[in-house]
Image: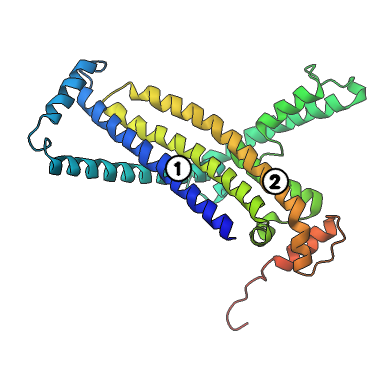
Amino acid sequence: MGVLLTVLGKKLAEQWLTLLALPGALYVAAVVGARTLGRDHTWDLDHLLDQITVWAEDPRIDTVAGQVVVFVAVVAASALVGLAAQGVSVALERVWFAADWASWPRFLPRLVDPLVGWRQQRWVRRHRAVEQARSPDHQFRSAEGHTFEVAYDRMARTGVEYPQRPTWCGDRLNALAQRLERDHDLDVAVVWPHLWLVLPDQVRLEITEARQGLGRATTLVAWGVLYLGLVVWWFPAVLVFAVLNVVGWWRTRAATEVYATLVEAAVRLHVGDLAERVGVDYSGLLTKQVGQDLSNRLRASFPSAPGL
């Protein structure tokens, strides 16, 4: 445990530097550059350099005290912007993974429901093609002529399991719960917090790093959102927004796949240890009975009303 906490402490320090401080300083510089160039001097680097020279020659800055004040101001602004990006990232994750989309406020579920329905219909069509490609009656080809591998990849691009959320990333995280429930009658939402406490340090470290990688990917998209605000002064900022969002979208999908795969693997490999700890009969094989008994053992009882 001590080794795990030490490694995590170092990781958090590195994460603060790479995710908040340095990108924040770059964003502060971009704000200054965008505000200075404006719409009249969009690509005029000479104008920017001249303005920087004027600031540098200001008597109030050309002193040790003035430079210290500027340095502290830049560091503080960088940290604040970094925290803002982190906040945007958290909001993006909630929307992107959409675990609770059906309970979103007011009219939002009505807007999202058609998208979920469209993804479900698309998945059903592509799943049918996979079944055709598996069948000798169709000469191991789908109606479109695709082999099983191609047909499955097309289906997986919509979802590896039947879609229940509006995004691929949300469905990929939900897929591990669907699989474990189907294969082992295991309620991963109930079991996972308890399993996490008994996992080996190395496994927890791998999963933590994967989760941090997912956070870094969504934070990259969050930075793109912040850069979009600079369009008010400097329209080429939209290019930065586009690049960061495309790269962030791709990295988020990849990181989601890695994280979901590791969590599912950890459950399948180590849930037997948890079963033995809580007194559930386990003979080395994760059967549906074991999964059901373990879920029931760990599930909290239903609350009762006072006085009943």
Residue 101 visible, this orientation: yes
Query: Which of the image's four quarters has the C terminus?
Result: bottom right
Please name whichever residue, 175 or 117, is drawn nearer the observer in this view of the structure: 175
Kindly identify which residue carries mark 1. Answer: 89
Please name whichever residue, 259 or 49, is drawn nearer the observer in this view of the structure: 49
Residue type at numbered disc 2: Leu
Q: Is residue 97 above or below residue 272?
A: above
Q: Which numbered disc covers residue 176?
A: 2
Q: Residue at x 87, y 60 (%)?
A: 283
Separation of marks 2 and 1 at Cα, in angstroms? 23 Å
Q: Who comes first in sequence, dot 2 or dot 1?
A: 1
Q: Which numbered disc covers residue 104?
A: none
Q: Is residue 119 above or below residue 49?
A: below
Q: Residue at x 71, y 47 (%)?
A: 264
Left or right side of 270 for 305: left
Say few, some or many: other residues with alpha carbon within 10 Å of mark 1 (under 14 / 14 to 19 / 20 or more): many
Say few, some or many: other residues with alpha carbon within 10 Å of mark 2 (under 14 / 14 to 19 / 20 or more): many
Query: To which quarter of the image does residue 239 belong?
Result: top left
Mark 1 residue element: helix
Q: Which scheme is used to colour this image of the protein? A: rainbow
